[in-house]
Amino acid sequence: MPVKDKFLNPEDKSYKPSRHPEHLVVVEREATIRYKKSYGGMSLYFQGIMEKENAVLRYTVCSNQDGHDEPRVLRFQVPRMDCPECYEKTAWESLPGETRFTVETKSTAVNLAGISFMDQLPVTVAWVQAVPPDGTALDTLTAGMVSLEDYNTLVKGDELRPVFRKAPRASASDVMWVRKGTPVRDLPEDYILSKRYKI
Ligand SMILES: [Zn+2]
């Protein structure tokens, strides 16, 4: 693990808890950790959003109706390997292009984010509801990254469309969301349309 230390300015508040800060040395340590992260059973979702112009959004389904509080099929838009109600294994499905995606609510814009989004602060997220052509909304919402400009004007019920990173990084940010009808020239930089989800 590469480590770089730098003497920390004695004015820094980190010295304050000491009764004798003048006899204390504090360094600022910068460390880089490289490791191999596996998406495990969620890999199919990431493979889908990494397919650029052929990208696909996958979700999971639990058909074990009798194991649910309400006896019906449950569908999870953020895929879940195990059903949170009955703990059975779920099955994978794909969202067709005719799926309607709408804003349900927005998250507070945050300036602190996971590593996938560190170069895209502030992170502006809309919670997206998907209604496949069968007309029944999926049972969970997905957190969709939107541009700051869109974030400031989106309201509940506005329609969104997914766009995908031209050079995928195998990160959740390989998919972003834009207003339905956004001209192709105005898509976020480095993102393209999938043939499956027209704008
Ligand atoms: Zn279940």
Image: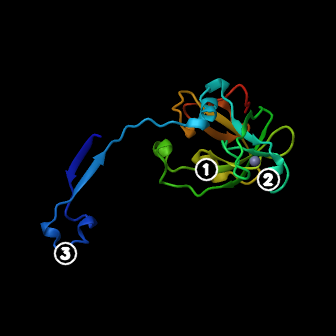
Quarter of image, res 160? top right
The verdict on label 2 being within 8 Å of ligand 1 is yes
Q: Which mark is residue 150?
A: none
Crowd rating for badge 2 (residues with CA inside 10 Å; few <14, some 14–19, many 20+): some
Q: Is residue 187 visible?
A: no
Quadrant in the picture for residue 166: top right
**Residue under the point 71% across and 25% down:** 195
At x 51% / y 36%, what residue is drawn? Answer: 38
- Give the x, y percent position of residue 12: 25, 64
Q: Relative to residue 82, is residue 33 drawn left or right? A: left
Q: Is mark 1 within 8 Å of ligand 1?
A: no
Question: Could you tell me how far apart the alpha carbons at marks 3 and 1 are, in whole angstroms?
Answer: 44 Å
Residue hosting label 2: 68
Q: Secondary structure at mark 1?
A: strand
Image quarter hosting the N terminus: top left
186 above or below 130? above
Given the image, on which type of amino acid does mark 3 rest? Arg
What distance separates the C-alpha of mark 2 from that of mark 1?
Answer: 30 Å
Residue on which disc 3 sits: 19
Tag 2 secondary structure:
loop
